[in-house]
Image (cartoon, grey):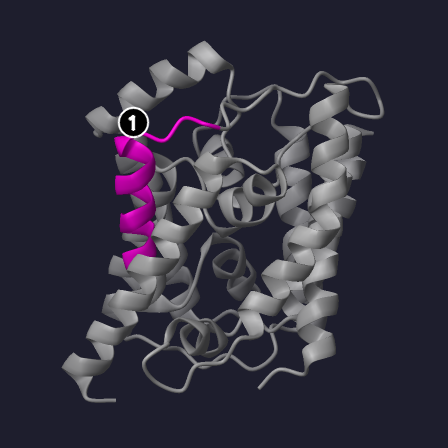
């Protein structure tokens, strides 16, 4: 179990990152959307997105990612990645865009999206547990 | 300046994900595993993030422009449509299978494990597929143009 102070302080930093990007740049810290725009390579308004992603990766690059226990096989991770990439773009957001920013914006749209992906993920985990017997 | 702000924002975000243990898929699965050994850490993290971000988003929504007077596009906060539900459900399935969402997925690349590359490559394929082939996406983009919605 992660120490409570760590969960809370980590969350506060995430919220602070979203707040800084919104208050100073007027942008939403939705990671799937940022990745989408960077991948689709429309040059021009690109610099802040690349800078945000660099900032995001810097702590893990310097400090390491900490313990990582993978929960799926390499093949399953590829499939899960496709579902995550496809789903977040069709649904216009992921945990950061809908779950943190949209919820903080008191957006019913984002709250519904967040409840949907959490509910489906809970069911998915329950099914995987059944199938693998873990 | 815009990029410097974004760099700082990304840094805070990345540090937060790291500190809260959200880069470890086991911690995500533990939160989602409500019928098994459930652990509430992710709920605490999301609550703290919400509490800190709420005043900023409320302020920005009321004011309409950023502190540096950049116009903040007003998101269509009430539009609940089929792409939103279907896309979120598909994302939920991928999230539940892997225990990884886009932010932590990218951060895991820093660890250099092949599995992180496989996951992120999958994400890229999914993003391109959504952009190129999905009729849902086309419908959504048309809606976005109407409401000048930035991708979240």
Of A100 and B34, nearer the camera is: B34
Q: Chain of mark 1?
A: B
Left or right, B97 with respect to A13, comes to left
Which secondary structure type mostly characterizes the magenta part of the structure?
helix
Q: Which residue matches tag 1?
A: B137
Counting from the top left corner in percent of width and height, residue B152 is at: 51, 35
Left or right, B73 with respect to B120, comes to right
Counting from the top left corner in percent of width and height, residue A19 is at: 74, 42
Above or below, comparing residue A107 to residue B51 in the picture: above
Left or right, A83 with respect to A65, comes to left
Above or below, comparing residue A24 to residue A114 in the picture: above
Q: Which residue shows up at 53% across the image and 75% down it?
A: B40
Q: Which residue shows up at 56% across the image and 44% down it?
A: A103
Dot 1 lies on which element?
helix
Picture quadrant where residue A12 is located: bottom right
Per the rendered image, the range of residues in magenta is B78-93
Counting from the top left corner in percent of width and height, residue A47 is at: 66, 30
Picture quadrant where residue A109 is located: top left
How dense is the environment of label 1, judged by Cα within 10 Å: few (below 14), some, or many (20 and up)?
many
Q: Is residue B122 visible?
A: no
Left or right, A95 with respect to B58, comes to left
Above or below, comparing residue B100 to residue B137 in the picture: below
Is B14 one of the magenta-colored residues? no
Q: Which residue shows up at 39% across the image and 58% down it?
A: A118
């Amino acid at each position: 179990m992660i120490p409570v102070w760590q969960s809370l302080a980590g969350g506060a930093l995430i919220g602070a990152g979203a707040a800084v990007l919104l208050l100073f740049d007027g942008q939403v810290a939705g990671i799937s959307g940022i990745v989408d725009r960077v991948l689709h390579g429309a040059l021009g308004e690109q610099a802040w997105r690349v800078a945000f992603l660099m900032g995001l990766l810097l702590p893990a690059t310097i400090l390491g990612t900490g313990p990582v226990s993978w929960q799926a096989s390499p093949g399953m991770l590829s499939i899960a990645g496709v579902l995550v990439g496809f789903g977040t773009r069709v649904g216009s957001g992921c945990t950061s865009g809908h779950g943190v920013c949209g919820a903080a914006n008191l957006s019913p749209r984002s709250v519904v999206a967040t409840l949907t992906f959490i509910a489906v993920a809970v069911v998915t985990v329950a099914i995987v547990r059944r199938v693998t017997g873990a | 300046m815009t990029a410097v702000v974004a760099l700082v924002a990304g840094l805070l975000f990345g540090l937060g994900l790291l500190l809260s243990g959200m880069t470890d898929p086991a911690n995500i699965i533990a939160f989602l595993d409500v019928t098994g050994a459930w652990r509430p850490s992710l709920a605490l993290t999301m609550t703290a993030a919400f509490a800190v971000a709420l005043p900023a988003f409320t302020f920005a929504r009321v004011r309409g422009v950023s502190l540096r007077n950049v116009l903040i596009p007003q998101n269509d906060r009430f539009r609940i449509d089929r792409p939103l539900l279907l896309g979120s459900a598909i994302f939920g399935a991928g999230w539940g299978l892997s225990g990884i969402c886009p932010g932590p997925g990218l951060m895991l690349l820093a660890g250099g494990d092949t599995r992180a590359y496989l996951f992120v490559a999958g994400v890229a394929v999914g993003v391109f597929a959504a952009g190129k082939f999905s009729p849902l996406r086309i419908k959504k983009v048309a809606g976005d143009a109407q409401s000048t919605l930035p991708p979240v």
